[in-house]
Image (tube, grey):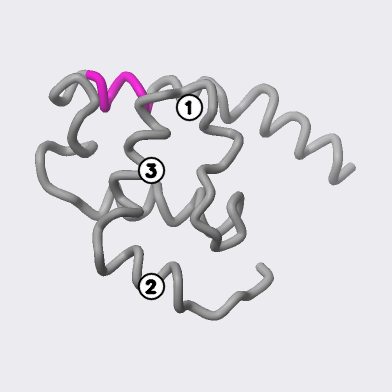
């Protein structure tokens, strides 16, 4: 059952949602900024944290789920490059969730 749920989430549920996130970015300065404009917001941090915590397991790698969405890949890197966030990712304890 767990594998079926994962397949459903990653195959059916997640991709259309990522398309919407990418469209949102594209409508904001052609994807060169953040979700709500030129400044980092809670929305950007939450998006980054979800993918970094659950999919990259706290590493700096861009999660594979984002590969088909180049604006989201760049957004992920942009958030990771915020000095305070990058510092936290490097030093935070590794935990299993």
Give me the C-alpha separation between circle 1 and circle 2.
27 Å
Out of 77 and 25, give the one closest to the viewer: 77
Residue count near mark 2 (Cα–Cα under 10 Å), binned few <14, some 14–19, many ≥20: few
Out of 34 and 77, give the one closest to the viewer: 77
Give me the C-alpha separation between circle 3 and circle 2.
15 Å
**Nearest to N terminus: mark 1 or mark 2:** 1
- In the rendered image, the quadrant that contains the N terminus is top right
- Which type of secondary structure does the marked residue at label 1 adopt? helix
Asked if the magenta segment contains residue 25, the reply would be yes
Residue 25 is situated, as x and y percent measured from the top left of the image, at 26, 27
Mark 1, residue position: 17
Mark 2, residue position: 88
Viewer-nearest of discs 1 and 2: 2
Residue 92 is situated, as x and y percent measured from the top left of the image, at 48, 77
| Chief SS of the magenta region | helix
Badge 1 vs badge 2, beta-carbon distance below 8 Å: no
Residue 15 is situated, as x and y percent measured from the top left of the image, at 56, 23
Residue at image position (69%, 24%) is 11
- Segment colored magenta: 21-26
- Which type of secondary structure does the marked residue at label 3 adopt? helix
Mark 3, residue position: 76
């Amino acid at each position: 059952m767990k594998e079926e749920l994962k397949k459903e989430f990653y195959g059916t549920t997640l991709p259309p949602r990522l398309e919407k996130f990418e469209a949102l970015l594209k409508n904001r300065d052609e994807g060169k900024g953040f979700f709500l404009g030129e400044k980092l917001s809670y929305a950007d941090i939450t998006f980054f944290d979800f993918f970094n915590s659950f999919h990259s397991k706290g590493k700096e790698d861009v999660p594979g789920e984002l590969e088909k969405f180049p604006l989201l890949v760049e957004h992920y890197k942009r958030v990771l490059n915020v000095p305070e966030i990058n510092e936290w990712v490097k030093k935070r304890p590794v935990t299993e969730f």
